Amino acid sequence: MTPRPVEFAPSTGAGMTPDKRSEIPETTAAAVRTCTRCRLHRTRYRAVPGEGPIDAPVFLIGEAPGRDEDTSGRPFVGAAGKVLDKVLQVAGLPRPQLYITNVVKCRPPENRAPKADEIASCRPYLLAQLEAVQPKVIVSFGATALRGLLGPSARFKEARGKGIEFGRVPLLPTYHPAAVLYNRRIEGEIRNDLRAAARLVSAETSGIRRGRGRKRNRSHRVSAGSRGPSRAAKRSARPSR
Ligand code: URA
C-alpha cells in the first residue's frame, strides 16, 4: 500500500482522533516494508521504517539505513547506532522513549548518499510519522537528513544552533553519529546538541520520564552549537555509514 502524501500539522493533529493517529506508525511501517516507489527497493534486504512510541517527545532523523540496519530492519543498530546509544545516554535521553527513523528507509547500495529523487519518494513516510508522533523536538543527524527535511537548499552549517523550526516544532540539526567514528571530537558536539534537545523537552512539557523533569520557560531559542562547531567538526564531511 502506498500512503497518500500528508501535510505535517503537528499542532493540530491534523484533525485526527487519537485512535487514528496511533494507527499511522504501523500502517506507514507496513507501507514502507512493501514500498517500490524508488530504485532502492531492488537492492534492499529489509526496509527500515523506524521505531519508537507514538508519544515520543523527541524525534530523531538519520540519513539512511546501513548494512546492519538493512539486515535487522531496525534503525541505528550498527556502529553509528552504538555511538548514538552512548550520546543519548550521556544526554539523559532514554532511547526507548524516542522515535528514531531516517529520511530514506532503504539502504542505498554501498552506503552511498541517498539521491534527491529517493529522498522525495520517501518523504511522505517521514511526514506521516511526524504527523503521528507530533514530537516536541526534532533532531536531524547530518546534512542529508537536514536537506531531507527542509529541502535541497538547506545548509547544515548555517542551520545548526540557529533555533530553527519545522512545522512549528523546534528542529536541532546536529552531526551524524557516524562522523564520530572518524573524528572523536564530534561526539561532544552531538552530546551538547542532544542535551539542548532534552532541555527543550523539559521546557515544553514535564520532560523526559527520568524523574527530573521540571517545567521551564517555553523559549525555542537554544544554545546548542551557538559557539559554532569546532574546527575538527567543520572538517567532517558526510560520514559513511
Ligand atoms: N546511519 C543512519 O543514518 N541511519 C541508520 O539507521 C544507521 C546509520
Image: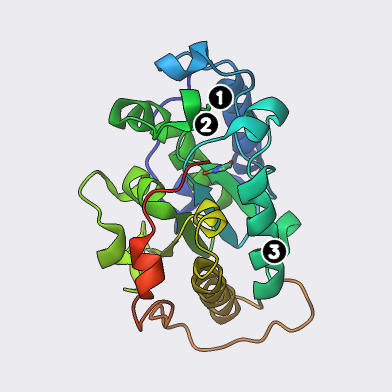
Q: Are marks 3 and 1 in contact (CB under 8 Å)?
A: no
Residue 145, position as x, y percentages in the image: 41, 47
Q: Quadrant of residue 101?
A: top right
Q: Nearer the viewer, mark 2 or mark 1?
A: 2
Residue type at mark 1 is Val
Q: Secondary structure at mark 1?
A: helix
The disc placed on residue 105 is: 2
Residue 149: image x %, image y %? 36, 47
Q: Amino acid at mark 3?
A: Lys
Tag 1 residue: 32
Task: Calculate the distance from the C-alpha at mark 2 to the C-alpha at mark 3.
Answer: 23 Å
Q: Earlier in the sequence, mark 2 or mark 3?
A: 3
Disc 3 within 8 angstroms of ligand 1 (CB): no
- Mark 3 neighbour density, 10 Å: few (under 14) some (14–19) many (20 or more): some
Q: Residues within 10 Å of mark 2 (few under 14, many from 20)?
A: many
Q: Residue at x 61, y 21 (%)?
A: 33
User: Residue 170: which quarter of the image?
Assistant: bottom left
The answer to whether residue 16 shows anywhere in this view is no
Q: Quadrant of ligand 1?
A: top right
Do tag 2 and tag 1 residues touch (Cβ < 8 Å)?
yes
The residue type indicated by label 2 comes to: Lys
At mark 2, the secondary structure is loop
The earlier-in-sequence mark between 2 and 1 is 1
Q: Which residue is mark 3?
A: 86
Q: Which tag is nearer the camera, tag 2 or tag 3?
A: 3
Residue 197, placed above or below residue 44: below
